[in-house]
Every structure is written in structure tokens, then in C-alpha cells.
Amino acid sequence: MNTMEQDLSGHSMRIGIVQSRFNHEIGDGLLAACLEELHRLGVADNDITLGTVPGALEAPLLLLKMAKSRHYDALIVLGAVIRGETFHFEIVASESARGVAEVQFETGIPVANAILTTDNDEQAIARMKVKGAEAAQTAVEMANLIRHL
């Protein structure tokens, strides 16, 4: 049996990041953790491109453009959708996740989705460092898996 092992080496890997500016404190925390982990995994700062968008619903379009450019081995999306008093939360959470998934299926470029969907700010703050780092790991691992195919 041939087994593809987990490979978290990010050396010479090009990563694109899309960050939502809505709930920017959470986004900034996600970004800091993500960048720290990417650097730890060996991704050079010059090989990371960051683009920001107004909110989570706008993220899939920039991801799609980045993926179609073929300049990136993997993409990461960062943001936070925090439940409010209206149905809008469900729409944004669902549609942004759908859009992110469509980008990777359409282009074959892996996208690590770290758009947090939480009931309140406290939950988002508690998750941002872990999820930012996990997004970096996921992007690198998936890019390496695709390379090995």
C-alpha cells in the first residue's frame, strides 16, 4: 500500500491569505497566529501575499481570483462571523463557507477556511489563535498532498 504521509514543510511554498476586515480584532488575531505558524513551518515572508476584503461574503471572490492566477500553492481565508439578533448570521456563515468550498473545487487550489462562526465575541477570541495556526497547517499540508499526486 502506498501511503501519503503528513508533510508540514512549507519551504518554497507560496501562500495567499484573504482576511475579512469586519470584526477586525478577531481577524488580526487570526492573522498573527497564522503568520507565526507559517513562518514556523518554513514559509518565507516574501512568499506570503495578504489581501483584505470588507467582510466574509466578499472573501470567495478574491480567493477565486488568487486561485486562478496560479501564483499560490494554497490559500487561507480568515475572518469572524458573530451571531447577532437577526437571520443575517446564518446567511453570511453559510454563503461564505459555500463560496470558499467552491473556489477549491473549481480550481484545485486548497483553501484553508478559518472564518470563525461563533455566538459571541468571547468564543471568537478564545478560538482565534488556535484556528489561525490550524489554518496555516492545513494549507501547507494540503498543498504538499496535491504536489505529491
Image: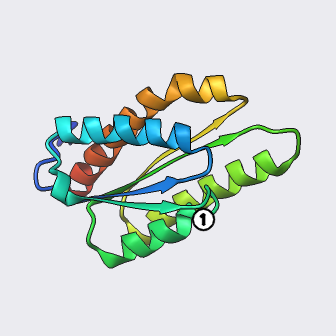
Residue bearing mark 1: 58
Residue at 54% of width from left, 37% of height from top?
A: 26
- Residue 16 falls left or right of residue 122: left
- Which residue occupies the foreground of this view, 29 or 110? 29
Residue 13 visible in rendering:
yes
Secondary structure, mark 1, is: loop
Residue at 77% of width from left, 46% of height from top?
A: 89
Percent across and percent down for residue 68 are: 38, 76
- Which residue occupies the foreground of this view, 18 or 60? 18
- Residue 51 falls left or right of residue 93: left
Residue farthest toward the front in the current orientation of the protein: 25
Percent across and percent down for residue 33 are: 36, 34
Examine the rendered structure and indicate whether residue 34 appears above or below residue 71.
Answer: above
Residue at 54% of width from left, 54% of height from top?
A: 20
Q: In which quarter of the image is the N terminus?
A: top left
Percent across and percent down for residue 53 are: 53, 62
Give the amino acid at mark 1.
Glu
